[in-house]
Image (cartoon, rainbow, N blue to C red):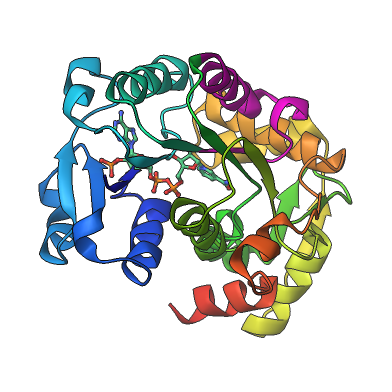
Amino acid sequence: MSIVVTGATGALGRLVVDELLARVPASEIAAVVRNKEKAADLAARGVELRVADYSEPATLAGAFRAGDRVLLISGSEVGRRVPQHTAVIEAAKAAGVAQLAYTGILGGPDADFALADEHKATEQLILDSGLPYTFLRNGWYTENYTANLAPVLEHGAVVSNAGEGRIASAARADYAAAAAAVLTGEGHLGKAYELSGDVAWSLAEYAAEVSAASGKPVAYTSVAPEAHLAVLTGAGLPAAFAEILVDVDHAIERGRLAGTSGDLTRLIGRPTTPLAATVRAALTA
Ligand SMILES: NC(=O)c1ccc[n+]([C@@H]2O[C@H](COP(=O)([O-])OP(=O)(O)OC[C@H]3O[C@@H](n4cnc5c(N)ncnc54)[C@H](OP(=O)(O)O)[C@@H]3O)[C@@H](O)[C@H]2O)c1
């Protein structure tokens, strides 16, 4: 049996593999990747590569073995993920895996915004499959914001329709540590964890943090959804994706990504990474 990470060449997946390598021998870890060349560094570290694509069910036949503990990292192609995840779940079921952990979304079945729909459907498919599961309902990555620092600094502005809503984000590395904990520990089957940062912050506080760390003036402007949509599409985002982001920010205004259950800090045995640390790391990167 192996500990298997899908999406292992992605930003979260690589961090999960790093965490696993710190806990178990490389010979016990397998990475499901769709591009072997992209995963050459993982192979060089002794991780077994299994090539499969969520969109090509036949390729998933060799991805899992009986007794494997599997992390399904949700796909990145919004709108295509239900059939993709269905194929992964069916392959895991056919193989007889011992655990299927899934990276869903904070709030699980109660999350009432469009981006959550595919995650809710996937959780239900996993429940229906009868597989032993662990739901890792991830809140926002702080890096969703810090990856976008260049235009924020250029314009001295954070613009959103999230109002004064708060975001209990954590660093990707925190969510990765939680995933490794449930894949290597015991007592996590049949559990759903609401994973989020210890502290919820507002976008006004984020702007102040960026300003303090960079030494440049940055202010938050709360705008109507239509105005935010115009800013995003004006910056070149496809309309459909911009609409999803505006819908998420509306959910943030309603407090849907502000929950601080403490599940994440309990799983990783340390405080989550503070906003200030991720902002400073991004500025010095
Ligand atoms: N909580 C949050 O704030 C947040 C934010 C953004 C996304 N997410 C979700 O969390 C997931 C992980 O985040 P991330 O930052 O690691 O995203 P990422 O860097 O885009 O990684 C996505 C991973 O999924 C793999 N993948 C995508 N489509 C696939 C397919 N058809 N077959 C096999 N593998 C496929 C990618 O493979 P390649 O390396 O070959 O491309 C990559 O390894 C995302 O996919 C998304 O569902 C969460």
Count of numbered labels shown in the rendering: 0
Residue 8 location, x and y as percent? Answer: 31, 49
Tell me which image quadrant ligand 1 sits in. top left
Residue 93 location, x and y as percent? Answer: 36, 21
Q: Quadrant of residue 184?
A: bottom left
- Looking at the image, residue 28 lies above or below residue 68: below
Residue in the foreground of this view, choosing between 82 and 205: 82
Apparent side of residue 14 relative to residue 124 in the rendered image (left or right) = left
Quadrant where the image shows the N terminus: top left
What segment carries the magenta color? Answer: 102-128
Residue in view at x 67 percent, y 45 percent: 193
Q: Quadrant of residue 57?
A: top left
Residue in the foreground of this view, choosing between 136 and 160: 136
Residue in the foreground of this view, choosing between 57 and 216: 57
Residue in view at x 61 percent, y 35 percent: 190
Apparent side of residue 96 relative to residue 252 in the rendered image (left or right) = left
For the question of whether residue 65 can be seen, the reply is yes
Apparent side of residue 33 relative to residue 132 in the rendered image (left or right) = left
Q: Quadrant of residue 51?
A: top left
Magenta region includes residue 76 = no
For the question of whether residue 243 can be seen, the reply is no
- Looking at the image, residue 27 lies above or below residue 242: below
Residue 139 location, x and y as percent? Answer: 66, 48
Residue in view at x 23 percent, y 49 percent: 30
Specify the principal SS of the magenta part: helix
